[in-house]
Each structure stands twice: as structure tokens, then as C-alpha cells.
Amino acid sequence: MAAGYALSYAIGLLLTDLRLRRRTEGLLDGRRISRTYAKLTTAATAAGGAGWFIARSCDQSLASASWTPALSLAAGGRAMVLLFLVFARILRIAELRSLPGLG
């Protein structure tokens, strides 16, 4: 489901880019936008993979069956957010510098 959503988002982004180029008569900086989206995709993919791995490893190591899903979700989600910010900083995504505390 997530892969289908990501694919539909990418197709929508491509169509939006094509329409905006026509309307702005090529004044849109497509290379910079494409680089930014590629960096965001890379950071999100790496963080998502690591978060999934951490959630799965927590799922298998915890003994209490009632709290296991909640703790796995919390660990994986926290890891994804933190790793996304780390990867975004490493990849020098300029748009994230405008967020408080990340500049």
C-alpha cells in the first residue's frame, strides 16, 4: 500500500512539474527541485528501512505480548524521525534549515 501511494505521489509530482513548466514558460528551476526531491526520497527510504528493522527487532525481543506492538511502533517511529533528520542534514537539504532548531 505504501509503495502504491509513493508511486502515485511520484506520478502526480511529475505531472505537476510538467504543467507548471508550461505555465511559467520554463522559469521553474527543475534541476534544483528534482535534486531536493531525490535527497528527500533517499533520506526517507533510508530512515524508513532502519525504522522498520528496529521495530521488527523490538517485536521479536520483547516478552510481554500486550505491550509489544506499542513499544515496537514507538521505537521504530522515533528511529525514523531521528534518522530522517540526520540523513537530511548529511545530504544538506536546504529547505530543512528553515525549521526551528535545525538551522
Image: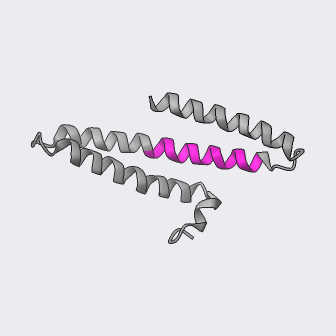
Q: Is residue 23 left or right of residue 16?
A: right
Q: Quadrant of the C terminus?
A: bottom right
Q: Residue furthest right?
A: 25
Q: Which SS does the magenta portion mostly show?
A: helix
Expressed as whole percent of the image width and height from the top left, the position of residue 58 reads: 23, 43
Front residue of this view, candidates 77 and 14:
14
Does the magenta segment cover residue 34? yes
Front residue of this view, candidates 92 and 7:
7
Expressed as whole percent of the image width and height from the top left, the position of residue 97 reads: 59, 66
| Residue found 72% across the figure and 34% down from its top | 15
Expressed as whole percent of the image width and height from the top left, the position of residue 80 reads: 40, 49
Q: Is residue 19 left or right of residue 52?
A: right
Front residue of this view, candidates 1 and 49:
1
Q: Quadrant of the N terminus?
A: top left
Does the magenta segment cover residue 15? no
Q: Is residue 100 above or below residue 86?
A: below
Magenta stretch: give its range.
31-47
| Residue found 59% across the figure and 54% down from its top | 91
